[in-house]
Amino acid sequence: MAAPSEEVIASAREQGLVADRLSHTIDRDTYTPALLGLLNNMLVWSGARLFQHAHGVGTNEWRIISALANHPGSTASDLCEVLGLNKSIASKSVAELVSRGFVAQLVGPRASRHLFLTQDGERVHDDLMPIARERERILQASLSPDEVAQLNALLVRMLEAEDALTRYEKDITG
């Protein structure tokens, strides 16, 4: 990062702004949530560019296509749970995929809407799979197979903290 000039620092102090580093900060390189957030941002934005270029779909649409390849007939609520997506984002992405002809909805009991890939959706999935796998290979290139397995196991264990994090959030927000 480029440090501000002494002139800018002096001006900040004159205006009563905090111009010195606080003694109690989070170090990005040792704070797990920051590292996971940075990694996620990198993957989402680079993936969005690639998936958009290849088929005009974003990362969330790709995630839904991939999930439906694994779980045909899922509802939007099912997808939210599996993918950790916000309902409004899932709804918008599903609507986009339906309008593009990549996903079809069938009405089930109690008006539930079950989602399935169309033939075009299957083609998009199959076209994007090598891109997704190559991105994974590049990301894991500096790790041994045992380290990859260990990392994945640790990440799954961290995901299991969701309930505890939700309770903590409710304790704070009421």
Image (spheres, grey):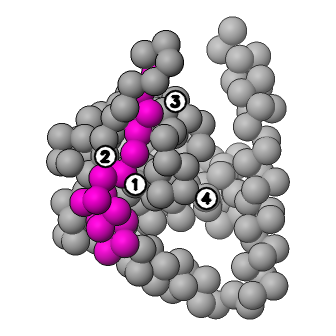
Q: Secondary structure at mark 3?
A: helix
Whether 161 is drawn above or below 142: the answer is above
Distance from label 4 to label 1 (Cα)?
A: 24 Å
Upstream in sequence: badge 4 or badge 2: 4
Q: Is residue 119 magenta?
A: yes
**Residue in front for this viewpoint, 74 or 64:** 74
Residue 3 is at least partly visible in this image: no
Closer to viewer: mark 2 or mark 3: 2
Distance from label 1 to label 3 (Cα)?
A: 15 Å
Q: Position of residue 5 (x, y in %)?
A: 34, 64
**Quarter placement of the N terminus:** bottom left
> Could you classify mark 1 by the number of other residues whose Cα lies within 10 Å: few (under 14), some (14-19), or many (20 or more)?
many
Q: Are marks 4 and 1 in contact (CB under 8 Å)?
A: no
- According to the image, label 1 marks what residue? 65
Give the residue type that dot 4 points to: Leu
- According to the image, label 3 marks what residue? 77
- According to the image, label 2 marks what residue? 103
Q: Position of residue 166 (x, y in %)?
A: 71, 27
Give the residue type that dot 3 points to: Ser
Closer to viewer: mark 4 or mark 3: 3
Q: What's the magenta region?
A: 112-127
Q: Position of residue 69 (x, y in %)?
A: 47, 57
Residue at (37% x, 72% y) in the render: 126
- According to the image, label 4 marks what residue? 36
> Could you classify mark 4 by the number of other residues whose Cα lies within 10 Å: few (under 14), some (14-19), or many (20 or more)?
few
Upstream in sequence: badge 1 or badge 2: 1
Upstream in sequence: badge 2 or badge 3: 3
